[in-house]
Structures are given as structure tokens and as C-alpha cells.
């Protein structure tokens, strides 16, 4: 299987460790991965702001760069959703692209990746993973197999954290209020970590927690799965 | 001030109003619990949604046929049908009916369409005393406020707020008893019912094959509104049509379950003509709905049965409240349809005021693709050049950057430099400061085998044994702001 990594631009720039963690896990599963160096952004910021004509060339570019791979795997539900769900709206046929947890559980049939992470964690369902890709049980199946990990569900796991890309920039007060509601729900679980498939959500949540509740840390699902 | 600036001001203020947030969380928390019970009563909720969406699809995609059938059947039942292209025509029809018949007092039951056409102001302006008889709407009326929510007009008020309103406006003693408050309103409203000349209602469904209108309510005031006065005028959006009487068997419980969690609302009335010696008029309002019908991509927004579920689940609505929108229809459905009904240029800002979380689409009982329509509205606004020219330029520059890995890397370096210089982006957005993934990958390929020289490392696991270095890297998500 020819497997390509799609590392979204903000993971590349801001959270490279998330991409590295994903590579670590895939290699532990004896998979060869390639990183097509020409990749940049999937086009989502333009698409979500209404600039479909500006997003389309990037979608076409993405399809060309990742053509010929059996699977493309990405540590982001949001960018995966952009490719798989929204490229067709731009008239572009998406390459077979999967979110990391989805790829492990649904494509490889793997739930135990040999990880150990002795901590109490709560899982935040990122909206795109949950509602565009319909991933609810997959990340939880993976977390259930992590040694030493205790998963506690928060009461508003499915409520948006308020990031929403340019939404957070255009409407910072609304975004902040949503973040606050989310973080109150997280804090009530008394978890040590909040985990998610999307680093953008964790950036939003982490920003609030750092100021108001520094006892709770954020970590990506890939990093937990990479930990041994 | 533009609708957009008004929205921003109001939303900003409400988002930080913690009392408001607590009141709404409590109200919607109770709603959520009841709806969960209600959905559990369905053998297959998802299948029920799919069938309901199919019925409404049929109705909307054959709107011409079903509306004409409805007109024929209503007339055959002894009623009259009026077609109104816009708000002004609808108001004029009501005013003409009222004048010709010497109407001096109107009782109204809850109707968002009459809010849409600003009927109360028109009636009062013509010297016709107009009384809202739904308890929530009555409270709105005496407070001089528009409804906060399409189903729950005073969701934002506590019992204490309502007692205070009654005390201030009606001079009644303060009480914390809901029963007493209801009795205060009831005592006043009963007098109005028996002396009104005309009753105005909305309609939840227009049944094409039998020529009936279906009205759903919990207080009995709608029944009194259309049965006590001699003249009944029902004003309704033309999208409320359903093909067959039997469709109600599904749509009634679906509406009440999504609206309030009830199996059925307390009163479900069917009006199939005038009472003896009376008159029955139905006003079918277009007011931009056929523009939406012409848009094949978003036509399903006309499926809406106004249950309010998308408002109740919307994290934006819950934080900014119904009044911030400045529209008749609030929340996701309002943000979707208002640009079509009232203009893209003035109302597309609402389509941007969403994180596109999609919770609305998941709860919609008639499967309107709400959050994707917000995306469509954004695209339409850009296509019609209602966007900010600077923003357009920024996205073109961004595209140019992203079309080349070299330019992309350079942009990343500039951002990293800005980060090193201490540039603070808005809110929590961190600036890149370390090695990128692609740098790590390149080095790793050169050196062969896993390595992380100078770059980020795979986190160590947590716990007392974790090194400070590992911990800092593990928890850095919130650390760069």
C-alpha cells in the first residue's frame, strides 16, 4: 500500500509534533509512509469564507499531488472533511483521504497501537470529525486500548469549541463564549488532559484553559497513541 | 446603523452576559432532557426524519400543484384564499377585511408570519385594538419586545422577570407562582376573546387534499382565537403546505417532539371552513419564499416546520440569544433564509456568524442541510461581490502563496520571525516558532531513521516520571499564545 501523509499547514507550522506522532504510530504498525513535499494547504480557509474560486486551484493541486496513492492519511478531521466532503462541491474528485483515527480503525482494523498513557483524559469531538466524517466511536475505541488511560466523558463532548477558523477571528467574543462553555464542561470531568482529533480545537480550548484552568492540558489523539 | 453592525454590537454584548447564558442554559437543558425522552418514543427517529423530509420534498417540489389544490379544497369547504406577494399586500388584505367588516378588536394566537409582516403595528395604526393571546407573546407584547425564539418567545425571561413585567405594566402584585402569573394573563385575555370581532392565527400545516389548516398549541388560546370571533383569518407562509391529511400522523409528533419534547402538543386543531355564520380566510404569503424555491441548492430550507430545534442546539444562538439576530427567524434557519427573504447584501453576515459545527443539520427533523447552506450563502455573497475587497485581496494573495511550496515555506518563516519578535495575533492563535514538520521530515530522511534534531519530539508519557522537557512539549497546545 502506498500511503501518503497529508500534514495540514497549521500542523506543519504550529504543531509538527502531532504529525511526527502520527508517523511514529504508522511506523510502529510497519507501514511505509511518504510525505509529498509539494503539499501546502487544502484550501479550507478560502472555501469556508465563500472564496470557492480561490479554493478550487488548491483542491486541484491537492488531487494532483496525491494522485496514485492508495490512501492519504491526515491528523485532522477538519482538513480531511474539506478534501473528502467538500472537494466534490468544487468539481474536484478527492483522493482517498482519511483522518488518522478513522484510517487506523476503519481502514486497517486496528484499535490497539501499543500505546501507554497513564492519565485521566476526556475526549472532545471535533465538529468536522463528528458530523462530516461521522467519527464518534473510532477515537474512543483507540483510547480504550491505551494502557493506563482512563477516559471520562464530558457532558458536552459534541458541543463546538467555538474555533471555526475565520469565525474565531471575525467574531472573537462569540468564539470566546463558546470556548468558555466548552471548558467548563471539560473542567467538570476533573480530567488531566483533553484530547481531540483536531489540533485547531485544541488550540482554542488550550488558550482558555491556560488562562483559567492550567491544571487541564491539551493533547492530540496522535500524541497519545505515540506515547509508550 | 447597518444590520451587520447592529448584530455585532448585540452579539458581543450578549456573549459576555453570564446571567443571560445561565437562563438559556437552564431552559435549553430542560428542553434537551425532554427531547431525548421524546425521541426515544420513536421506533426509528432517523427513519421518521427521512420520511418527513420526503413528504416535505414532495410538497415543496410540487408547490404549484398542491397550493392550487389547497385553494380549491378550502373554497369548496366554504373558506376564502388570498395570495400575498409581500408583507405590504398581506397587511393590506387583513386591513381591508377588517375595515369592510367594521372590526374594532382582534385577538391573535402565536404566529411568526404576522411578526414577519409587522401586522400588529399596521392594525394598531388603523385603530384596531390587537391582543396577543399566547402567554409568551402576550408578555412580549406588553414588554414591547419581539419574540426571542420562534417557539419559546420569552425563553430569556425567568418567572421573576415576568412577575416584574406584570407588576410594572399591569400593576399586579409580585409573585413567584407560575400559576398566579398565568391566571393574571388569563383573566385579562378571556375578556378580550369574547369581545373580539376577528381572530388571527398562523398555521403549522396546510393540508392540500382536505383543505384544512392545522394549528398546534399548548394553551388553548388558538382554539379560542379562531372559534369565538366571527371572522377567522389565518396568515401563513406558502411553504407550510403538505400533500395529504395522513401526513399529519408523522408531522404532528415530529414537530412536537423537536419543538418541546412532547409526544403531541396539548391542542392540535384542524380548521376546515368557517364556523356557522362566520368567515374563514387563509392568506398565503410569499414574501421571498419563491426566490428560495427557485434556488435548487437551498430549496430544502422551505421544508422548515418551525420547530426551533436548530436554535436550541446552536452554540452561537445559546451564547448571543435570539434578539441579537435582528430577524424574525433566529438561529441557523434564520441565518439561512433571511438573505433570501430580505437580501444577501444586508443579511449575509449571519451566515458567517457560525463555526459551521453542523449540530443544527443533525437535529433538523426535516433534514434541511442547514450548515452547508450557510456555506452556500457565503459563496453567494462573494459571487455577488458583497464581500470586503480587502478580504478578497487577502485570499488571492493567500492562494498565490499556497500554490507554491517555496512561497508557502517563506510565508511560514515570516510568521515564525514575527512570532520571535513577539507579535501577538488575535486571541489564542499561536505564532510558529520552532521547526516545521517538513523540516523534521527532510532531516529525518537525510539522516535515515527516526530522529528529531533540534525539532519537536514525540511526547513522553505523563506522570511523575515525565521529564520537564517532555511535559512542556506535550502540553504546548495552549502554551504558545
Image (spheres, coloured by chain):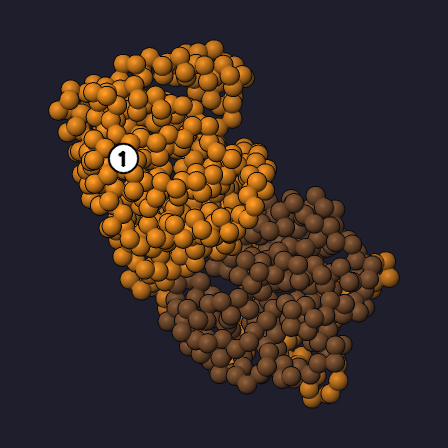
Chain colours: A brown, B orange
Element at label 1: strand
Can you say whether B355 is above or below B224 in the image?
Answer: below
Looking at this view, is B164 or B63 the one in front? B63
Point out the image quarter for the N terminus of chain B.
top left
- In the picture, measured across the screen, residue B360 lies left or right of residue B386, that is right
Q: Residue at x 51, y 71 (%)?
A: A83
Instruction: Say left or right for B298 vs B99.
Output: right
Q: Residue at x 31, y 35 (%)?
A: B213
Q: Is residue A4 above or below residue B89?
A: below
x and y, in percent, of residue A49 in the image: 42, 62
- Host chain of mark 1: B
Q: Quadrant of the C terminus of chain B?
A: bottom right
Circle 1: is it few (<14), some (14-19), or many (20+) Cα within 10 Å?
many
Q: Is residue B214 left or right of residue B66?
A: right
Q: Is residue B308 visible?
A: no
Coordinates of residue B308 in the picture (x, y in percent): 45, 41
**Location of mark 1 (residue):** B235
Amino acid at each position: 500500500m502506498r500511503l501518503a501523509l497529508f500534514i495540514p499547514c497549521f500542523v506543519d507550522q504550529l504543531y509538527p509534533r502531532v504529525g511526527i506522532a502520527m508517523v511514529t504510530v504508522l511506523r510502529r504498525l510497519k507501514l511505509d509512509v511518504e510525505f509529498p513535499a509539494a503539499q501546502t494547504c487544502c484550501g479550507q480557509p478560502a472555501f469556508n469564507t465563500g472564496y470557492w474560486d480561490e479554493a478550487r486551484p488548491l483542491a486541484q493541486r491537492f488531487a494532483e499531488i496525491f494522485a496514485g496513492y492508495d490512501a492519504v492519511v491526515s491528523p485532522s478531521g477538519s482538513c480531511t472533511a474539506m478534501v473528502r466532503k467538500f472537494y466534490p462541491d468544487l468539481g474536484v474528485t478527492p483522493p482517498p483521504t482519511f483522518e488518522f483515527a478513522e484510517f487506523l480503525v476503519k481502514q486497517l482494523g486496528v484499535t490497539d497501537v501499543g500505546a501507554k498513557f497513564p492519565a485521566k483524559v476526556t475526549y472532545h469531538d471535533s465538529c468536522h470529525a463528528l458530523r462530516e466524517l461521522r467519527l464518534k466511536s473510532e477515537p474512543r475505541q483507540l483510547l480504550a486500548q491505551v494502557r493506563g488511560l482512563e477516559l471520562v466523558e464530558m457532558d458536552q463532548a459534541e458541543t463546538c469549541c467555538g474555533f471555526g477558523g475565520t469565525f474565531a477571528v471575525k467574531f472573537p467574543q462569540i468564539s470566546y463564549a463558546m470556548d468558555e462553555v466548552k471548558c467548563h464542561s471539560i473542567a467538570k470531568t476533573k480530567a488531566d488532559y483533553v484530547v481531540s482529533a483536531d489540533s485547531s480545537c485544541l488550540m482554542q480550548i488550550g488558550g482558555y484553559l491556560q488562562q483559567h484552568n492550567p491544571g487541564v492540558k491539551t493533547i492530540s489523539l496522535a500524541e497519545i497513541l505515540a506515547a509508550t | 446603523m447597518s444590520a451587520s453592525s447592529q448584530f455585532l454590537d448585540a452579539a458581543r454584548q450578549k456573549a459576555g452576559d453570564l446571567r443571560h447564558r445561565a437562563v438559556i442554559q437552564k431552559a435549553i437543558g430542560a428542553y434537551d432532557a425532554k427531547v431525548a425522552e421524546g425521541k426515544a418514543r420513536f421506533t426509528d427517529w432517523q427513519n421518521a426524519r427521512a420520511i418527513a423530509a420526503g413528504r416535505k420534498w414532495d410538497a415543496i417540489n410540487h408547490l404549484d400543484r398542491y397550493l392550487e389544490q389547497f385553494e380549491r379544497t378550502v373554497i369548496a369547504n366554504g373558506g376564502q384564499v388570498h395570495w400575498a406577494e409581500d408583507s405590504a399586500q398581506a397587511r393590506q388584505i387583513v386591513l381591508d377585511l377588517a375595515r369592510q367588516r367594521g372590526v374594532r378588536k382582534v385577538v391573535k394566537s402565536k404566529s411568526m408570519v404576522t411578526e414577519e409582516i409587522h401586522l400588529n403595528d399596521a392594525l394598531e395604526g388603523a385603530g384596531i385594538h390587537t391582543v396577543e393571546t399566547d402567554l409568551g407573546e402576550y408578555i412580549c407584547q406588553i414588554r414591547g419586545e419581539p419574540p426571542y425564539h420562534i417557539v419559546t418567545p420569552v425563553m430569556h425571561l425567568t418567572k421573576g422577570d415576568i412577575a416584574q413585567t406584570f407588576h410594572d405594566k399591569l400593576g399586579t402584585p409580585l409573585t413567584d407562582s407560575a400559576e398566579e402569573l398565568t391566571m393574571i394573563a388569563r383573566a385579562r385575555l378571556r375578556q378580550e376573546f369574547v369581545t373580539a370581532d376577528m381572530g388571527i392565527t398562523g398555521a403549522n400545516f396546510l393540508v392540500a387534499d382536505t383543505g384544512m389548516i392545522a394549528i398546534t398549541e399548548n394553551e388553548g388560546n388558538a382554539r379560542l382565537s379562531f372559534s369565538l370571533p366571527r371572522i377567522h383569518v389565518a396568515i401563513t407562509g406558502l411553504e407550510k403546505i403538505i400533500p395529504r391529511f395522513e401526513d399529519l400522523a408523522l408531522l404532528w409528533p415530529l414537530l412536537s417532539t423537536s419543538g418541546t419534547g412532547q409526544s403531541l402538543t396539548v391542542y392540535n386543531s384542524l380548521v376546515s371552513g368557517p364556523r356557522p355564520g362566520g368567515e374563514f380566510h387563509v392568506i398565503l404569503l410569499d414574501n421571498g419564499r419563491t426566490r428560495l424555491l427557485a434556488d435548487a441548492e437551498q430549496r430544502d430550507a422551505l421544508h422548515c416546520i418551525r420547530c426551533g430545534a436548530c436554535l436550541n442546539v446552536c452554540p452561537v444562538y445559546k451564547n448571543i440569544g435570539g434578539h441579537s439576530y435582528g430577524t424574525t427567524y433566529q438561529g441557523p434557519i434564520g441565518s439561512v433564509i433571511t438573505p433570501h427573504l430580505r437580501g444577501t447584501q444586508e443579511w449575509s453576515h449571519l451566515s458567517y456568524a457560525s463555526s459551521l459545527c453542523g449540530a443544527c443539520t443533525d437535529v433538523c427533523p426535516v433534514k434541511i442541510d442547514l450548515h452547508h447552506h450557510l456555506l452556500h450563502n457565503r459563496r453567494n455573497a462573494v459571487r455577488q461581490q458583497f464581500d470586503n475587497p480587502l478580504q478578497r485581496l487577502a485570499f488571492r494573495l493567500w492562494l498565490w502563496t499556497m500554490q507554491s511550496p517555496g512561497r508557502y515555506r517563506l510565508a511560514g518563516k515570516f510568521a515564525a520571525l514575527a512570532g520571535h519578535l513577539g507579535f501577538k495575533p488575535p486571541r489564542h492563535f499561536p505564532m510558529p516558532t520552532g521547526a516545521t514538520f517538513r523540516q523534521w521530515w527532510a532531516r529525518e530522511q537525510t539522516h535515515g531513521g527516526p530522529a528529531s534534531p533540534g525539532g519537536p519530539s514525540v511526547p513522553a508519557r505523563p506522570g511523575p516520571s515525565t521529564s520537564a522537557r517532555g511535559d512542556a512539549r506535550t502540553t504546548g497546545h495552549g502554551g504558545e499564545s
